[in-house]
Image (cartoon, rainbow, N blue to C red):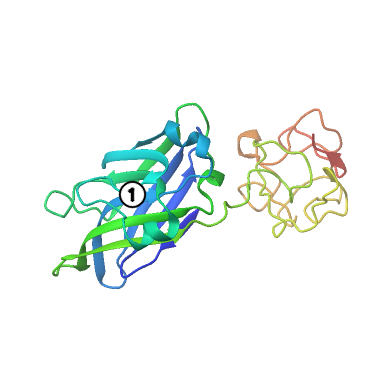
Amino acid sequence: MTFTIEGDVSVRITVTEDGAGGLVFDLAVIDDTGLTADLNGLFFDFGDAALVDGLLADGAEITKTAFEYDGVDNLGGGVCIKGDLVNDTDLYDAGVRLGTSGMAKDDIQTTSFTLTHETDALTLEDVANMDFAVRLTSVGEIDGDRDGSLKLGGTSPDAPADDSGVGDGGGDYSGDDTLPDDPDTFPDFPDDGGELGADDEFLFDDGGELDGGDPLLDGPGDDGPLQPPADDPLLSDPALTDPALEDGGMYYEDISIL
């Protein structure tokens, strides 16, 4: 999930699920206008009020955190978000202070940290459509006077669709599936519970051997049959029947994946 909090100096925020129940936050000052700033703090709301008290944040440049449902607007040292932003959105649920105030000891334009919970796995849904704010100091021209400060607010977008499975979400597939869950990529994938038919655009249907002319994928080489098992992102389960792939697995044109 990537979005931008816009202002005289904008900040790009990318949030990524780390696969272990945590969310990695990457923050970057966008200086394409000739202005830059020192990142001092990030404030945000959280989707599940019951989980707020158990949140933890870990990062090399974190100097203070605060987690309290509808209770965070000041992290000390001038890193606060009081004013119009708080009046408009109420207080935030989480605050992360970054470095020290001013640029005497540090001048942070990019940073990252990981948000976790004591007991629960976090997902992008937890921070989707939430109010966010950043506190910026030492705002000014690059290599010039930097005596300004900003408090900027914005809203995160919807969580992106899960693309870890196959098809357009109609069938039952596990998180280990490797084809994208994108109807634009495979527009003919059925939504009837998982039956792959010979008329599906991405199924090869001329006798079984997948090659460079197939509309699906044909291994890393892109010019021949699927590669050996370690490189084979498709189906190579010997329990399946019909023509064998090059790697000894099986493929057939009317298959139900459970």
Residue 19 in picture, x, y percent from top left? 52, 36
| Residue in the foreground of this view, choosing between 181 and 70 | 70
- Tell me the residue at 25%/69% (across/down): 35
Q: Where 224 falls versus 174 (above or below)?
A: below
Examine the rendered structure and indicate whether residue 26 appears above or below residue 57: below
Q: In the visual, does 60 lie left or right of 167?
A: left
70 relative to 182 in the view: left or right? left
Mark 1, secondary structure of its residue: loop
Q: Quadrant of the C terminus?
A: top right
- Residue 115 placement: quadrant: top left
Residue found 69% across the figure and 36% down from its top: 174
Give the residue type at disc 1.
Asp
Q: Is residue 181 left or right of residue 201?
A: left
Residue 118 visible here? yes
Return the residue nearer the eye: 81 or 161: 81
Relative to 28, does residue 179 appear above or below in the rendering? above
Determine whether 42 is above or below 58 in the image: below
Q: Is residue 60 visible?
A: no
Q: Which residue is nearer to you in this view: 73 or 207?
A: 73
Which residue is label 1 attached to? 73
- Residue 148 x %, y %: 20, 66
Lateral position of residue 37 relative to residue 163, left or right: left
Q: 10 Å neighbourhood of mark 1: few (<14), some, or many (≥20)?
A: many
